Amino acid sequence: MTSPQQPQPQPESGAQPMSPAAAPTAGPMPPAAPPAAPEQPAPQQQSEQPAPAQEAGTMMLQAQSAPAPAPAQEGGTMMLQAQPLPQAQPPAGGHPEPRPLSAHGPGKDAGTMLLKAAAPPQAPQPQPAQPPQPPHPSPNYQAPHGGYVSPIPVRPTHLGHALAAEWTKIRSVRSTVWTLGVLVVLILGIGLLTATALSGHDVNPRIAFGFFGVMLGTLCIIPLGVLVISAEYGTGMIRTTMTACPSRARVLAAKAIVFFLLAFVITTLAATLVALAMSGMVGGREPTVDEWLRATVGTGLYVSLLGLLALAVGSLLRHSAGAISAMFGVVLLPMLLAVFMLGASSLQWLTKGLINYSVPNSLATLYGIPFLPDHSGPQGWTPLWILTAVAGVALGAAFLVQERRDV
């Protein structure tokens, strides 16, 4: 980069011309160097500092006063910046020795050209968008130590939830409708037929022959008690039940409570209707309050406990056909064996024991008409207490096996 040479002023009459040997050389010199100009006052520069003496043919870049820092340039901007000229002190001879331009570099003498690229400004890092935070629910057992809390409100489960689930199951399957429907038809149908057949006859007490319909109705409550739990083992749905409610004792307790209450209500209502019909159609002695309670509430409790025993057996065996067959054997086998042993005199004690503690004789005892006239067996409410103890033992065994055995 070159700058045009300024015309040098003519020396005055009193100035001495400079000899050619004393003039500095910069590149090819003309044959006769012009005489040095006398010192004149320097023109007003933009910088406030006085400029040093310049030589003829020397290219100099003079820096102005540093302006205020400019804002950051965009990426790729080329900026031409000149270094300030050092204040060169002339030697004793009068003029500084010129240096070649190629020796100039960063931080060198006058005439340095610095090409600098401004650094691109740092773009702000984009912050990731934060998703909207859901409202913080109330603390629950899911996060006892400040961990993740589900936005779905969760309540601790209890026996009431299991009861609601089992009630939904038992009322939504067809086996419940069929078995309980046949139970009601047998108790009411056979009871009303018996009352019609005995109309005008005396019976002591009047409501005694309602026993026939209840006896046949027990053959329907036993399959229902078994199917309440064994059907889930047969289809594999017991795994879903245990996943929803890991407490196995709670599941079994809910099944037992729902089934017992349903069977008790249905059986008691049907037995009460039959007792009212017989009391109005059959002649004979008026039943006492205790006889009324045993023929209605006692009968409902006995049939319900028999179904609860079937549920316990179904939980132990986990097989519908096997549990139903076992329960029919418990209900019918003692009476059948006693009938075959009636002719053996040496086995009379065993025959009487089988008859007195059989299920049909226990129901007949609640109605006040036991099979054996000597009244050597249980009387009054005793058959109900015996069945309660047996069902309790079987149900306790079912709870113990349910906790120890896998599904």
Image (cartoon, rainbow, N blue to C red):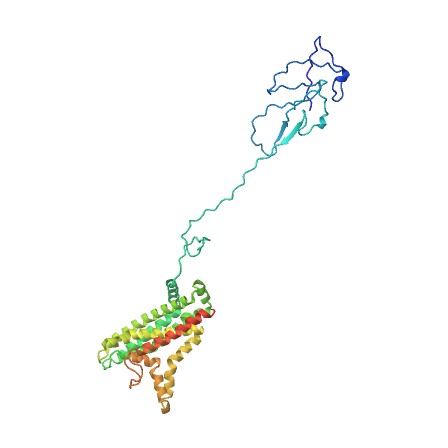
Q: State the residue lying farthest toward the front.
A: 92
Compare residues 307 and 118 and report the one nearer the observer: 118
Compare residues 90 and 321 and report the one nearer the observer: 90
Task: Place residue 272 in its image quadrant.
Answer: bottom left
| Picture coordinates of residue 302, whole percent (x, y) | 33, 75
Determine if residue 113 is in view: yes
| Picture coordinates of residue 112, whole percent (x, y) | 67, 26
Residue 88, above or below 240: above
Residue 6, above or below 192: above
| Picture coordinates of residue 206, whole percent (x, y) | 24, 79
Compare residues 213 and 200 and report the one nearer the observer: 213
Task: Place residue 15 in its image quadrant.
Answer: top right
Task: Place residue 166 in its image quadrant.
Answer: bottom left
Report the residue at 38% width, 62% height from top: 158
Residue 180, above or below 334: above
| Picture coordinates of residue 182, whole percent (x, y) | 35, 73
Determine if residue 221 is in view: no
Q: State the residue lying farthest toward the bottom.
A: 345
Figure quadrant of the N terminus = top right
Report the residue at 35% width, 88% height from top: 349
Report the residue at 30% width, 72% height from top: 268
State how many labels appear: 0
Q: State the residue lying farthest toward the top.
A: 13
User: In the shown orientation, is residue 375 left or right of residue 322?
Assistant: left
Compare residues 111 and 236 and report the one nearer the observer: 111
